Image (cartoon, helix red, strand yellow):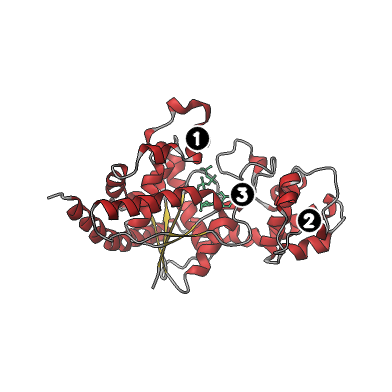
Amino acid sequence: MPRVFSGVQPTGNLHLGNYLGAIRNFVSLQDEHETIYCVVDLHAITVQQDPAALREQILEVAATFIAAGIDPKRSIIFNQSRVVQHAELAWIFNCVARLGWLNRMTQFKEKAGKHRENASAGLYVYPCLMAADILAYQADRVPVGDDQRQHLELARDIAQKFNHDYGREFFPIIEPLIHGQATRVMSLRDGRAKMSKSDPSEQSRIGLTDDADTIARKIRRARTDPERLPDEAALADDGGLSPDLVDARPEAANLLTIFAALARKPVADVVASYAGAEFSRFKTDLAELAVASLAPLADRTRSLLDERAELEAILDSGAERATAIAQPVVNEVKRIVGFL
Ligand code: AQP
């Protein structure tokens, strides 16, 4: 059975982009794959975290996985720092990856910003750890949002270089699964910026635990443009939104995409229903849809968090099951490399 691996950082409240771009897709993959879902806490500390908040956020991400429909019996759910092989393999990959490759990573440039000299070395080698996360399990399918495409290409390069340098077809070729209707959900304040946990504006994102009033308010205040909603002329031949619309009216395109993804309908149907409408009517309906979709998820997450011991037991058992897979793989890597 093909093996799937993916991770989510416990760096703050999860948002609609994390859900539509990644977590929702994790659920359906359980049927035909061996699935491993990780709370990537080693990644989280590449930027500064408050230790007490980090502990809570690890549990929150695990609870959200389960609330969204990931079954801890069928899938392995654990936090990264509990399985030492991630860090061990990451070191070996630090020695495989080339500086030139890392220098091209746009996420490092965006996150380090103007203070590059002050960014942690961990943030710079983040993609090597991500490659280790996947390859410690010899996983070959990785469901992620579109923002992770470049990191996955680098992970493929690392696997290929390792195989080539040591003359063994040891690591599989990773296949990114960038699926679903909303692979890149944009900020509600700026249709050209990704919705992100680390955006300083709370108004830019819909949190998965936001209450109904907060969701409605954020959608009401979401940035739009002065025109009415577009009609069928905004569609491309494949039925999706045309690149011209996305370029000229990114906020409208983003809200239409979110609507379609939440309603699980083709975006063309949403365009047809609201062609020429004012944003106010559309936003009212979108807020209702978002609340109806997210409220049950938030309720389930909260009740799982109340059963803290149970959640911790799931992470314990997940870490054991994950170690059982990763340990022999990384032992073999050490042997290939020449460690005694
Ligand atoms: N805006 C997004 N649209 C679609 N998918 C997204 N993902 C993140 N943002 C969007 C996907 O969610 C998964 C988990 O992401 P992550 O926690 O590992 O970190 P990230 O990609 O860096 O996301 P954030 O929310 O922007 O976190 P911070 O601010 O901490 O960096 C991934 O599959 C990601 O593609």
Q: Nearer the viewer, residue 199 or 246?
A: 246
| Relative depth, front residue between 135 and 172 | 172
Q: Which of marks 2 and 1 is nearer the N terminus?
A: 1
Q: Residue 179 carries which label?
A: none
Look at label 1 and name its amino acid: Lys
Q: How far apart are marks 1 and 3 (CA)?
A: 25 Å
- Please give the residue where the numbered disc 2 appears in the rendered image: 234
Image quadrant occupied by the N terminus: bottom left
Residue 137 in picture, x, y percent from top left: 33, 60
Label 1's element? helix
Residue at image mark 1: 109
Residue occupying image coordinates x 63% and y 61%? 181
Residue 40, percent across and down? 41, 49
**Mark positioned earlier in the residue sequence (2 or 3):** 3
SS class of the residue under badge 3?
Answer: loop
Name the residue located 70 percent from the left edge and 40 percent from the top edge.
189
Q: Disc 1 vs disc 3: which is toward the camera?
A: 1
User: How many residues crowd mark 3 within 10 Å: few (<14), some (14–19), many (20+)?
Assistant: many
Up/down of 46 relative to 332, above or below: above
Q: How busy is the neighbourhood of tag 1: few (under 14 within 10 Å), some, or many (20 plus)?
A: some
* Helix, strand or loop for disc 2: helix
Q: Can residue 14 be seen in this view?
A: yes
Instruction: State the separation of the CA atoms marked 2 and 3.
Output: 29 Å
User: Total marks drawn?
Assistant: 3
In this rendering, position of residue 215 left or right of residue 62: right
Rendered image quadrant of residue 232: bottom right
Badge 2 amino acid: Ala
Alpha carbon of mark 2 to alpha carbon of mark 1: how far?
A: 33 Å
Residue position for label 3: 207
Whether the residues at callouts 1 and 3 have beta carbons within 8 Å, the answer is no
